[in-house]
Image (cartoon, rainbow, N blue to C red):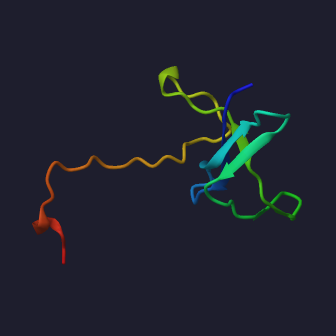
Amino acid sequence: MADRYDLKTARTGRDGKTYWTKIGVMFPMRDRDGFNITLEAMPLQSMNEQGQLECRITAWEPYKEDQGAMRSEPSTTSSTPEWPEKPDTLDDEVIPF
């Protein structure tokens, strides 16, 4: 059992792929059986295959940077955005206003 789990919720992108968004953490209680859950965001309800509203949160063992290749997850892509490199200097002449 892991010491901590990342809580994620799935969403379907316009491209039909599943993207996972981290919304909190879950960790075992110290003094008794059970878990503490801390949410940083609330997932939205969506319609499941039976036509019912559902709000689903999935617990994952945290991804460790030093593991090399990313472990297999049900999603086809990560929800972590690819940010452009930060420029060394800011050039006001590039701003269009």
Q: Residue at x 66, y 34 (%)?
A: 4
Residue pictured at 89% horizontal, 59% vertical: 50
Question: What is the x, y in percent for residue 40?
Answer: 61, 55
- Judging depth in this view, the residue of 13 and 83 nearest the camera is 83
Residue 86 percent across, percent down from the top left: 25, 49
Q: Of all residues shown, which one is farthest toward the bottom?
A: 97
Image side of residue 44 versus residue 14, left or right? right
48 lies above or below 28: below
Report the side of 57 relative to 6 (left or right). Answer: right
Residue 84 in the image: above or below residue 48: above
State the image coordinates of residue 77 (x, y, percent, origin top left).
56, 42
In this rendering, is residue 74 above or below 38?
above
Q: How many numbered circles does the render carry?
A: 0
Q: Is residue 52 left or right of residue 84?
A: right
Q: In the displayed orientation, state which residue is furthest to the front.
A: 31
Relative placement, left or right, of 86 versus 69 is left
Rendered view: 62 above or below 37: above
Name the image quarter holding the C terminus. Answer: bottom left
Nearer to us in this view, 41 or 30: 30
Name the one closer to the observer, 48 or 64.
Answer: 64
- Res. 51 image quadrant: bottom right
Residue 83: x percent and y percent? Answer: 36, 49
Q: Quadrant of the N terminus?
A: top right
Q: Residue at x 72, y 47 (%)?
A: 37
